[in-house]
Amino acid sequence: MGFVQKFIGDAKLDTAHSENGNDRHTDLADGALDTLGCIIRTMGSASFPLANEADPSAFAAQCDDFACHVENGAAVPSANIGQSADGGREWSQVRRFFIDRRQNEKEFVTNRLEDYRGFVDDLVSGLRQIGPRNQETEQSVRESLDTIEHAIVTGALPEIKAALDQSIETVSETFAQQKQDYEDQINDLNDRMSNLRQDLVTVQEEMKRDNLTEVFNRGAFDKAIAQCLNTQFILNQPVTLVLIDIDHFKTINDSWGHAAGDQVLRSIGECLERSFIRKRDLVARYGGDEFAVILNDTTGRHSKPLIDRFFQHVESIVVPYAPPDAHVSCSAGYTEITPSDTVESLLVRADKALYRAKAAGRQCARYSPPEEE
């Protein structure tokens, strides 16, 4: 298919020939060439400055050369394209020039967005730590004041002076340490901003998969749950964590072999991905026969039907090398994230809910409210 045909299609080209002859054909070709030349020049004047470009104006000049080549067959020295003697164009090189640039710009923008995401995560983590640090400082000051007050009420002048000296030293050390902590944190954030290091949850880490089940692995979960805590702290949007454990998994391994156990784990992974299908959610193998699911923008109340759907999928799992009446079931515990949560407090709450599900006879889910300690 010719160049003009790619722009206007066979039918339109045929119509142009039949109605207006070669003049019409020439007008269409010239218009297409002018339009493509304009597109290439605009790409040069309004492009993203890539990280490895020492002089962005050089790319604009290269775009101008390619535009002239498209319009009249002019040379493009930077691409080793000479002046056309017969008006021909190197269309394959024009296409490759445009495609390579757009791909490089996409990679550049994607990396920068990931870098800034990482910086924001660092900043939020620092803000989350300020509250506890201030509370520790306040407690230290209060204890020092209590010491002075007690000395004034019960002690003689030397005791009061000793209490004052000790309190002043303690408070000074406390504020000095707090100042140092803040300065260290600010320096770390400044380094992060200036260097734009890779995002804490890099694309490679996010795509790490468990080799057996093909869901995300524990490392990806650890990164994701920390990021969810920061996001929830800023946006106050609901996030639910679900911990899932295969009931009597040891019996499956002991009775029918580890090959059967491996196949059950694979089947559970498949059931999880069929049940929690949104791209913004994360399904991971937490360890052994335990899995974890992060449900973003989802409350505990809205999580329950999704967990029930997973249980229904599990009922259809067939255990290989086992009698026909052998079946697989799971227990689940889930809880919502709160702004004051740490990863540890969140996992403890979800674990408590999971233990209650097992104590209730397994093959069920239990919920731990956020206020539960």
Image (cartoon, rainbow, N blue to C red):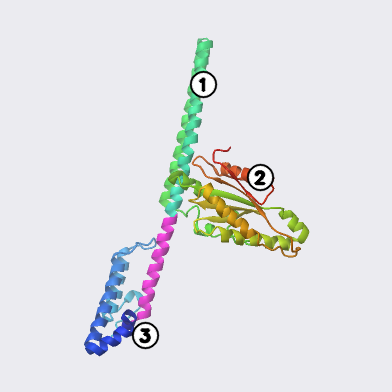
Does the rendering let one see residue 169? no
Q: Secondary structure at mark 1?
A: helix
Q: Is residue 97 left or right of residue 126?
A: left
Mark closer to the chain start, 3 or 1:
3
Mark closer to the chain start, 3 or 2:
3
Name the amino acid type tagged 2.
Tyr
User: What residue does disc 1 label?
Assistant: 166
Quadrant of res 373: top right
The residue drawn where x is 29% and y is 71% is 39
The residue drawn where x is 72% and y is 63% is 259
Could you give the CA–CA distance between mark 3 and mark 2, rounded to whole angstroms? 67 Å
In the rendered image, residue 109, in percent from the top left (x then y), is placed at 40, 60
Name the amino acid type tagged 3.
Met
In the rendered image, residue 136, in percent from the top left (x then y), is placed at 51, 31
Quadrant of res 94: bottom left
Q: CB of mark 1 within 8 Å of CB of mark 2? A: no
The residue drawn where x is 51% and y is 21% is 166
Report the front residue among 362 and 128. 362
Q: Main secondary structure of the magenta part?
A: helix
Q: Pointer 1: residues within 10 angstroms few (<14), some, or many (20+)?
A: some
Mark 1 vs mark 2: give the one in front: 2
User: What residue does disc 2 label?
Assistant: 355
Does the rendering let one see residue 194? yes
User: What residue does disc 3 label?
Assistant: 1
Could you give the CA–CA distance between mark 3 and mark 1, rounded to whole angstroms? 89 Å
Mark closer to the chain start, 1 or 2:
1
Q: Secondary structure at mark 2?
A: helix
Residue stretch rendered in magenta on the structure: 88-114
